[in-house]
Amino acid sequence: MDALMAVIDQIQADRITFAASGNVSVRDPRHPDRFWITPSGVAWPHITYDDLVALSVETGTVLDGRLKPSTEWRFHRTLYARHDWIGGVVHLHSRYATIFSTLGEPIKPVHYQMARVAYQVPVVPYETYGTPALAEAVGTVIDKDCQAALLANHGLVAVGDTVAKAYQYAQEIEWMADIYYHARLLGTPRILTVEEIEKVRDQFAQYGQTP
Ligand SMILES: [Zn+2]
């Protein structure tokens, strides 16, 4: 759960969301059939290790922890249950992603960095927060080719094989939403094509320090 606490610290340092809005979780590396999530209604600066809550991936039952889990535990559970490669889930009410969510507009690929996460970030239709209907809607959209989505009139969700990766994707999407928003104030940004994004994906596969 150190990885989860590190992301909680980073969310505060980055000031990417406010007060108690948003929630993050990590699949337990020793027990892949459970995940740890932030508690309900505790502001980010006050969350400690002892506040985290463990739930069963299969049933959503609380297995460990003294507080109530985040009200959004259902969509976290659905994502872990449907995709065994998902190791972490990050949900934020970050400014620019949330603006696009209120317009019901996907974040289009105006920058090549989008290739890491999806072709574009789609919008999950509006459902009341915390409901099984929202969990089902999120579960339908997220997969390996689409590791982030906007929740209409709500915010952003991103996943990854680790919680650090899920947070990195959330940051990248928030940054791209900021660029897209401002580009549209000045004119009509060019949208990258599927082929252009696929070429970047091929290059990302070879990027970095690994031989
Ligand atoms: Zn939310």
Image (cartoon, grey):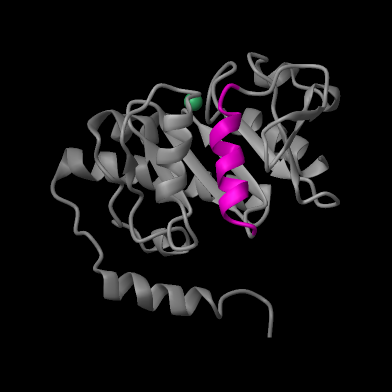
Q: Is residue 102 above or below residue 84?
A: above
Where is residue 104 shown, x and y percent of the image? 25, 35
Q: Is residue 88 above or below residue 19?
A: below
Residue 115 at x, y percent in the picture: 41, 64
Q: Quadrant of the N terminus?
A: top right
Image point 41% across, 45% down: which residue?
A: 149
Q: Nearer the viewer, residue 184 or 45?
A: 45
Magenta range = 71-84
- Residue 94 in view in this figure: no
Corner quadrant of residue 76: top right
Left or right for 66, reference 189: right
Answer with left or right where residue 196 lies relative to residue 167. left
> Is 168 on the left or on the right of 102, as rendered?
right
Residue 79 falls within the magenta-colored stretch: yes
Direction from residue 136 to residue 61 in the image, left or right: right
Of helix, strand and loop, which mostly describes the magenta segment? helix
Residue 56 visible? yes
Quarter of the figure that contains the C terminus: bottom right
Q: Residue 117 location in percent, x, y?
A: 46, 58
Outermost residue, front side:
59
Q: Give me the residue at 68% from left, 42% from top.
A: 57
Residue sitting at 40 percent across and 21 percent down?
128
Relative to 144, residue 39 above or below: above
Q: Position of residue 145 (x, y in %)?
A: 44, 63
